[in-house]
Image: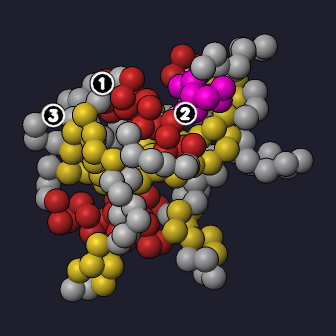
Amino acid sequence: MTKRCNHYELAFETYLREHRVAYVAVNEQRRSLTHQGSLKSLDFIVSLSDTASLLIDIKGRRFPSGGQHKQYWKNWSRWDDLSSMACWQDRLGCSSCALLVFAYQVVGDRSPVEAERLFAFRDRWYAFLAVRVADYIQFSKPLSARWQTVSMPAQLFRQAAIPFDSIVGWQNRSLLGDKLAGAVDLPVGMPAPAN
């Protein structure tokens, strides 16, 4: 494992290791330089087979976010992250697919995935939802010009996002997916993960 301080990335990397998914964790300390400028590093390269690779940028969010006014399906991203991921996909060719993986730390009594799809890590529950960068770019709307952030409307995000385990579990499945990722009520009194 790489030395990471981001618990969302650590949880995802532990998930990959525990599920025996081949991956490379990328050193994010330096940006790559190209003739057009610099590219933000991605977080992971995941190998699904000898012919397909996933280029992954982790987006850690709480589910729900906010204090008194709970907000579900927060999915904002910086435009620089999206343009860099699209460039990486172009450079690495048609056998690669750039994905944003939203690593949601479930902090309430609802989850973006079914309870059996949650991943326990360091006494926390996580849900991993993937969206193709191409879809995210197509359907995102400006959020903040100052911070250069965009976000997908929640309804479109829920249609485009698929549980990451469905990608690594069914490797021949289309990355577009046909699943809706709807909020799921967790069982009452669901215990904290034992890690």
Q: CA distance from mark 1 to mark 2?
A: 18 Å
The amino acid on which the numbered mark 1 sits, given as a three-letter code, is Arg
Q: Residues within 10 Å of mark 3 (few under 14, many from 20)?
A: few
* Disc number placed over residue 42 in the picture, else none: none
Q: Quadrant of the N terminus?
A: top left
Q: What residue is shown with label 2?
A: 127
Residue 124 is covered by the magenta coloring: yes
- Work out whether residue 55 or residue 160 is closer to the camera in this orientation and state it: 55
Amino acid type indicated by mark 3:
Ser
Q: Residues within 10 Å of mark 2 (few under 14, many from 20)?
A: many
Q: Position of residue 50 (x, y in %)?
A: 10, 37
In the rendered view, would you say 50 is above or below 141?
above
Residue found at the very far left of the displayed protein: 50
Q: Quadrant of residue 146?
A: bottom right
Q: Which residue is mark 3?
A: 49
Examine the rendered structure and indicate whether residue 192 appears above or below residue 13. Answer: above
Q: Is residue 90 magenta?
A: no
Asked whether disc 3 touches disc 1, contact meaning CB atoms under 8 Å apart, the reply is no
Q: Earlier in the sequence, mark 2 or mark 3?
A: 3
For the point 62% across and 48% down, the residue is 61
Type of colouring: secondary structure
Q: What is the spatial separation of the Cα atoms under label 2 and label 3, in whole angstroms?
A: 23 Å
Residue at which label 1 appears: 20
Q: Identify the magenta region.
A: 118-127
> Is any atom of residue 19 visible in this view?
yes
Residue drawn 62% across and 70% down?
A: 143
Decide which of tag 1 and tag 2 comes sooner along the chain: 1
Residue in the image at 23% along x and 80% along y: 34
